[in-house]
Image (tube, rainbow, N blue to C red):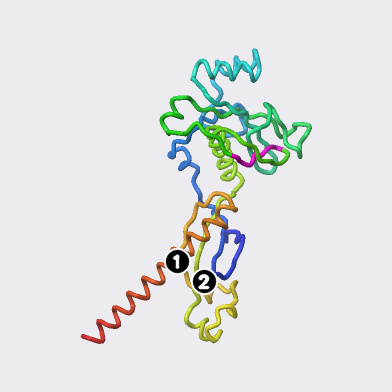
Amino acid sequence: MSYVHSTEIRDGLRVQVIADESYDWDFLKEAEPLGVFVVSARNFGCGDRDLEGDERDALERGGWKLLVRYLRMSKDAVCVLPVSGLDHSGQTIWVASSPGETSASDSAGWDSGGIGFIYTTRERVKELGIPDTTREIKMRLGFGSYTDTVSEVEAQLRGQIEELDQLMTGDVWGIVVSEPTDEAMVEADNDVTLIDEDDDDAWEHVDSCWGFIGIEYAEKDGVSEMLDNAKATIEWRTKAAVKVEEAWATA
C-alpha cells in the first residue's frame, strides 16, 4: 500500500494525501520545457542529453567561464546555470551557487558535486513568450535556501530543476476524497466527526487525482481543488437522484 502522508476530515469529507508511486517522467519531456538540462555525470540519467564534445573541451580548457562563453556564442544561450547533485541512498539535484558545489552533508565531495548545467536560448525564450521581468523566489542550494530576486527566465530554469528533483526524490502525490457510508453515518448518529478517519470500510470514494508535484502544492492548491471537485460531484449525484425519484413518482 502506498504511503499515506496525511488524512483529515474537511467539510464532512475525508481527504487523504498519498504518495504517487506510478508517476511517469516522460510527461516532462512531452511538456517541452524552457531549458535544456545537460548532464556530464554518468551516474545521473536525468538529463535531456549528455555533454557534447565541444562543451567538454571548453570545460577542460577554460572551466565554467569558457563553457558559458561557448554556449552564448554557439547556441545563443541567454542563461546558463550550474547543476549539482548528491548520489547517496537516492539522488537529489539542485541549481548550484557555484560550479562543482557539494552538499552540506558531503563537504568532502565523495558523493556530491557538479553534474552538469541547464541553459536556454534567446529563440526559446521568444518562442515561449517569457517576459523580461524579475520576481522573488526561494533559492534552494546544497546547504539550504534563501529568497532572492532573479529574472523570469532564471526563475523558470530553477523551477525546472526543482520539479525534476521532486520527481527524483518521490515528492509526487495523489489526493483521494471520500464520503462516509450510509452505515457509518447511522452508527455515528449523523456526526461525521465520530467516524474513524482511518477505517476505510467507513468511507467510499468520491474523487481522486494523481501527479501533484511537491507536497506544499499538493496540500494547499491540490486539496482545495479536489474538495471543490468532490463537492460538485456529490451535488450533481444528489440532483440526479432527486430527478429519478420525481420521474418514478409521476410515472
Q: Residue at x 44, y 36 (%)?
A: 32
239 relative to 116, above or below: below
* Label 2: few (<14), some (14–19) or many (≥20) C-alpha neighbours in 10 Å: many
- Quote the CA–CA distance across marks 2 and 1: 9 Å
Q: Is residue 10 magenta?
A: no
What secondary structure prevails in the magenta region?
A: strand
Residue furthest toward the front? 133
Q: Residue at x 52, y 34 (%)?
A: 133
Looking at the picture, which amino acid does disc 2 mark? Leu
N-terminal of the pair, mark 2 or mark 1, is 2
Name the image quarter holding residue 249: bottom left
Name the image quarter holding residue 151: top right
Q: Secondary structure at mark 2?
A: strand
The circle drawn on residue 230 is 1
**Residue 35 locus on image (x, y percent):** 51, 31
**Residue 235 locus on image (x, y percent):** 39, 72
Looking at the picture, which amino acid does disc 1 mark? Ala
Q: Secondary structure at mark 1?
A: helix
84 relative to 77, above or below: below
Mark 2 sits on what residue? Answer: 13
Q: Residue at x 62, y 31 (%)?
A: 83
Q: Quadrant of the N terminus?
A: bottom right
Q: Are marks 2 and 1 in contact (CB under 8 Å)?
A: yes
Which residues, given as a range, are shown in magenta? 136-142
Q: Quadrant of the C terminus?
A: bottom left
Q: Residue at x 41, y 67 (%)?
A: 232
- Residues 87 and 117: in front is 117
**Residue 20 locus on image (x, y percent):** 54, 54
